[in-house]
């Protein structure tokens, strides 16, 4: 056989083998009526790699299975009825990520020796400190945990770690944590970090040639550092918070003037933080006499005048008084109970409007808080007769006129302003029956506005205030007047229960003003211990459904978990320094305005007489 025939024979064998292989592959992919044994006999054996691949891919194919129509419809209905599902899921994931990050970094600190902390962990120090700042009001150990991270960075830098650097950003973050604690200890710790930063920076700037440079040359205090420390003192609730905040402001201005550093130029934010400290101190409940409160209100106005002078002379262009600056000073006077304080508040409000018109400054537009603070000043004043109620209502009328006729949205009246007018009526220092009549007419007019809901529905504070109006102003000299007073209280109680605003303070006021029999017949509650006598317990829940007892208003010091704000008994006496003769003269001048009207309360137009 020639080589030609041998090659042709091999070629034919290859063709036959390829044909048979194709036939078997075709039979595997087609349905067959063969038995299972015949099919297994005809199946081409697979390699071990192919078998392993099929076993591994089987679960993935099961997961990729398309949902049925019923499942798709059920999922769509769930999303339709729960539109906030994605937001809750993101919040849940964010919380899990936050807690996981804190656990991870604490584990890294415990496992890594000093000087060997990985760079990845060092980069997460500042984010973790910022997380502790958000948790400072909820967790008492948040500030301590943040300090632990800060001290570890210092230790890493001291050990010679090339990746550990104490920067101004890191120091500002740890100061922010202590600021959020709203405690005296937090404010003192924040100020100590600021002093340490200043000392380290000065040491680095005055290093002696031939000696090693300072380790913390990059911890230069900036505006954020001083603002955070001042805000920490203003929120601390300490008796000397205002003085400490002012001291930091003076230190900042001195450093800017001596060093000619533009990064330390004071601005409006830090001045407003100092004003907030004085406003809070003016309204504190510390038993220190009237001297400290008068000093706080007066010094707040002096700081505002300094802001105006610095801006108008061009010395500090960034110190520009805004509406918040005026509001804080007005708030300080409204809580001082100083003679002539409401007239002074109206003067400051008029000054703010004049500067807005003169400079065309949109940041000086009075808002509802500004007018409410003036009304509150009249409500807490020592004015006698119906002047208090009439002046408060006159400011509200001016406020409503600005909103309706001049379309000033910021001047829109709200429940707080109307409640302050009711407070002025309730605390009228009656001298004649005409004063009672005028105060009742104003309170009834305000109550009609509140019940209409055009400026918001009355809350539980509003109901308590209006109940005080009824219990204090309605005369009880004869039986008919007592019945009229009882009917007015019953109507207030009915509206309060209908709106779900019945609170404990409301019941206490009713107990103090009614006899035990009248109280039990009107409310169905026991007079002594407020135990429920009603058979229907759900009815009482309906009466109190909308009460928010822990509603903190602006500038009220929030209760803090750090309650170690005890002061030395002599601290108040040390801070209550004697005013200078010029200060005493100006305060006496203000008291001469008692009994007179302010700028906005000159036209005292009473509402039409209404009866409840």
Image (cartoon, helix red, strand yellow):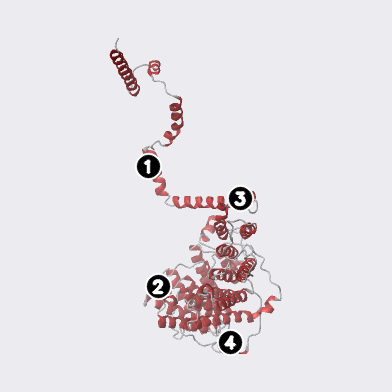
Disc 2, disc 3: CB below 8 Å?
no
Decide: few, some or many residues near mark 1? Use Cα within 10 Å; few <14, some 14-19, many ≥20: few
* Front tag of 3 and 1: 3
Decide: few, some or many residues near mark 3? Use Cα within 10 Å; few <14, some 14-19, many ≥20: some
Mark 2 = which residue? 409
Disc 2, disc 1: CB below 8 Å?
no
Q: Which mark is residue 108?
A: 3
The residue at the far right in this view is: 569
Decide: few, some or many residues near mark 2? Use Cα within 10 Å; few <14, some 14-19, many ≥20: few
Q: CA distance from mark 2 to mark 1?
A: 46 Å
Q: Residue at x 45, y 84 (%)?
A: 604
Q: CA distance from mark 3 to mark 1?
A: 47 Å
Image vertical order of residue 110 relative to residue 272, above or below:
above
Q: Quadrant of residue 214?
A: bottom right
Mark 1 = which residue? 73
Residue 446 is situated, as x and y percent measured from the top left of the image, at 46, 74
Q: CA distance from mark 4 to mark 3?
A: 61 Å
Q: Which mark is residue 587?
A: 4
């Amino acid at each position: 056989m020639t080589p030609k025939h041998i090659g042709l024979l091999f070629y034919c064998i290859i063709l036959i083998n390829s044909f048979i292989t194709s036939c078997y592959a075709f039979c595997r992919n087609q349905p067959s009526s063969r038995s299972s044994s015949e099919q297994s006999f005809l199946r081409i054996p697979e390699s071990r790699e192919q078998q392993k691949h099929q076993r591994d891919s089987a679960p993935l194919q099961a997961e990729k299975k398309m949902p049925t129509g019923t499942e798709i419809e059920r999922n769509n209905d769930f999303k339709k009825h729960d539109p906030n599902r994605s937001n809750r899921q993101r919040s849940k994931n964010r919380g899990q990520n936050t807690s996981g990050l804190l656990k991870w970094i604490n584990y890294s600190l415990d496992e890594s020796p000093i000087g060997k902390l990985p760079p990845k962990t060092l980069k997460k120090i500042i984010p973790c400190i910022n997380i502790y700042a958000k948790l400072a009001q909820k967790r008492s150990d948040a500030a301590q945990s943040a300090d632990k991270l800060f001290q570890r960075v210092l230790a890493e830098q001291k050990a010679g770690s090339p990746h550990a650097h104490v920067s101004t950003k890191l120091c500002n973050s740890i100061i922010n944590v202590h600021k959020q604690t709203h405690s005296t200890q937090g404010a003192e710790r924040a100020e100590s970090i600021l002093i340490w930063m200043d000392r380290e920076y000065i040491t680095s700037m005055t290093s002696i040639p031939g000696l090693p440079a300072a380790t913390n040359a990059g911890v230069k205090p900036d505006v954020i550092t001083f603002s955070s420390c001042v805000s920490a003192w203003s929120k601390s609730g300490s008796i000397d918070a205002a003085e400490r905040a002012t001291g930091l402001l003076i230190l900042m201005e001195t450093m800017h003037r001596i060093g000619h550093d533009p990064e330390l130029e004071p601005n409006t934010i830090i001045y407003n933080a100092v004003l907030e400290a004085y406003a809070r101190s003016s309204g504190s409940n510390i038993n220190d006499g009237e001297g400290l409160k008068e000093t706080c209100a007066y010094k707040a106005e002096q700081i505002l005048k300094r802001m105006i002078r610095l801006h108008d002379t061009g010395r500090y262009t960034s110190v520009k008084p805004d509406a918040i600056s005026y509001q804080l000073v007005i708030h300080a006077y409204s809580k001082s109970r100083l003679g002539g304080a409401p007239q002074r508040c109206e003067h400051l409000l008029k000054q703010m409007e004049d500067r807005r018109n003169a400079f065309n400054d949109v940041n000086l537009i009075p808002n509802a808080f500004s007018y409410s603070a003036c009304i509150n000043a009249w409500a807490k004043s020592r004015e006698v007769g119906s002047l208090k109620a009439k002046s408060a209502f006159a400011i509200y009328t001016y406020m409503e006129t600005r909103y309706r006729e001049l379309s000033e949205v910021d001047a829109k009246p709200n429940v707080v302003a109307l409640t302050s007018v009711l407070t002025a009526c309730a605390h009228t220092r009656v001298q004649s029956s005409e004063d009672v009549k005028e105060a009742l007419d104003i309170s009834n007019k305000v109550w009609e506005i509140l019940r209409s809901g055009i400026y918001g529905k009355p809350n539980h504070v509003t109901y308590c205030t209006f109940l005080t109006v009824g219990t204090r102003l309605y005369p009880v000299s004869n039986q008919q007047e007592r019945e009229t007073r009882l009917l007015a209280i019953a109507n207030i109680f009915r509206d309060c229960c209908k709106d779900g605003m019945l609170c404990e303070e409301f019941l206490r006021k009713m107990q103090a003003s009614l006899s035990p029999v009248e109280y039990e017949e009107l409310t169905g509650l026991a007079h002594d211990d407020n135990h429920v006598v009603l058979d229907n317990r759900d009815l009482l829940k309906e009466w109190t459904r909308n009460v928010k007892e822990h509603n903190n208003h602006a500038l009220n010091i929030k209760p803090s978990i750090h309650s170690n704000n005890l002061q030395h008994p002599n601290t108040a006496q040390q801070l209550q320094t004697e005013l200078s003769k010029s200060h005493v003269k100006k305060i006496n001048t203000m008291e001469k305005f008692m009994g007179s009207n302010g700028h906005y309360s000159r036209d005292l137009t009473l509402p039409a007489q209404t009866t409840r």
